[in-house]
Amino acid sequence: MIESWRDLVLAPGGERGEASPPTAARVLNTLLALVLLIGAVTLSLVKLNYNWGWESVWESRQILFDGWLMTVAVACVALIVSAAGGFFLALCQRSFFLPLRYFAKVLVEVLRCTPLLVLILVVWYGVCVVLHIDNRFLAGVFILTLYESAYISEIMRSGIESVGKSQIESARAIGLTRVQTYRYVIIPQATRQVLPPLAGQLATMIKDSSLLSIMAIKEFTYNAQQVNSNTYNTLETYIPLAVGYLVLTVPVSVWSRWLERRFKYET
Amino acid sequence: MKLDLQNVVKRFGTHTVIDGIGLEVDGVHCFALIGPSGGGKSTLLRIVAGLEYPTSGSVALNGRPIEYHDEALLRHRRSIGTVFQAFNLFPHLTALRNITLPLEKVHGRTTAEARELAEATLGRFQLLNHAHKRPAELSGGQRQRVAIARAIAIKPQVILLDEPTSALDPEMTAEVLELIEELKQEGRDLLLVTHEMGFARRLADRVALLSEGRIAEFGPPDQVFGAPQSEVTKSFLRRVLRY
């Protein structure tokens, strides 16, 4: 209910801000933020006195689009494989067999503490050379998967741990085996905890995949760099690059928030 | 029910929870464990339930010694019904599915059989209207009654109830106690840990009072409540019956 201009700029409940603002206020303030952002960017471009030349970039649009598709493909494949990898690592971290448990723990910690760019350099110029792996796409997806698996395993682990001890106790009491307990009790309950951050991780993965350009995988960022060095139209290439990523990541991020809210209300 | 405990000891680290309990109960339908908190009642029930290993000693239920290793315990747990104080049900499943899950996955019933059995059990407890609700949509008393329905649907040799009403308000406590009384009248065997003294006195055939990991008093309820021998029992009953 909008009764005065105050309702449009001040959250209901004042500083406590528990209730969510009315729809009109949300839309208005979101638009305001976008106008400010776009305005600031436009203003600095005007100040730059930039000599725009979109023609040559427009001619290279196919290269950019192919790169964009490659990024989508890399992120999707990496998400699926690293979801499985992360789940496996999370299970290993809970294994009864201690060498396996600690191997998984150490691996996850090392991966999480390594910058992705450094991991790419070490694996691509080190491990892949030793193992004679020269398929860039596979190597790139593998490295990204390895890196994201470490993060996803932490998401999965906290999801599994969010299932109360009493639930596992009940499962034991009715005579479920360990595998059945995972299958029928832990996984279904952990899924609702895991899904929102997992969707968020997809957005991170899309962004992280841009670093694969360092090993000349023909994804979005790499192709944009190619177009730039062919045409010398820097901003005409890099602004579409930024927009191309936002088109992918913003919906995924919004979707993740939506999942979070939905599961919060259900419990 | 026949329960035979021989010199059962349970330690958690250096803390002794059960300190050498020996006990024989035979031909009893309802055996109640009472006593102060931390006295070892729940731990003893969990040992009989096959959820906890005794540190030493032996337990036999209905003439069969319980073997304390993982595989045998899994079989043992499948032959009994255990109901805890709270959070028995799986929150992501409906009441009906909570009951059919063990019937199908543990006891090998077909989907149709399990469903029929679960509906019959819910129907007997006037819970059929709630069959398709999840635990969050049920009252605390209804949840415990569904949990008991799940426990009896598998036709267990004994039903173990660990403070089944301690998390409930008085009105819900009554509805759950009524149900437990019905089970007793059907001739089912119950092992009950409870703080409801009046209920234990009325329902149990034998009562044991546990304090500091030992049995302070054991006998028919009239003897334990009416003419307690030990000082521990007298002071416990004075304290709990004062109000």
Image: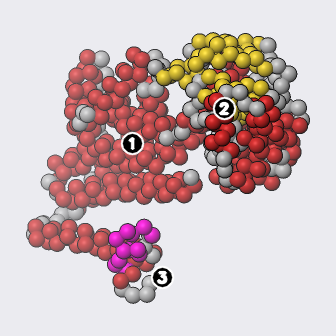
- How many residues crowd mark 2 within 10 Å: few (<14), some (14–19), many (20+)? many
Tell me the amino acid under the disc marked 3: Met
Which residue is painted at 28% across and 22% down in the image?
A128
Q: CA distance from mark 3 to mark 1?
A: 42 Å
Task: Tell me: residue B134, above or below residue A151.
Answer: below
Residue that badge 1 annotates: A75
Q: Is residue A164 left or right of residue A106?
A: right
Find residue B233 and name its label: 2
Q: CA distance from mark 2 to mark 1?
A: 68 Å
- Closer to the camera: disc 3 or disc 1? 3
Task: Tell me: residue A88, above or below residue B202.
Answer: above
Q: Is residue B132 left or right of residue A180?
A: right
Subunit ID for the residue under disc 1: A
Nearest to N terminus: mark 3 or mark 1: 3
Report the label total: 3
Q: How is the image coloured?
A: secondary structure
Residue that badge 3 annotates: A1
Q: Look at the image and give the residue range highlighted in magenta.
A: A8-19
Is residue A13 within the magenta segment?
yes
Label 1, secondary structure: give it: helix
Can I make out residue B81 in this image?
A: no
Residue B172, image x and y in percent? 72, 52
Label 3, secondary structure: give it: loop
Is residue A204 within the magenta segment?
no
- Closer to the camera: disc 2 or disc 1? 2
Going by the picture, which residue comes out furthest to the bottom?
A: A4
Residue B76, image x and y in percent? 71, 20
Tell me the amino acid under the disc marked 1: Ala
Tell me the amino acid under the disc marked 2: Thr
| Of the pair A120 and B202, the residue shown nearer to us | B202
Residue B37, image x and y in percent? 58, 36
Find residue A63 and name its label: none
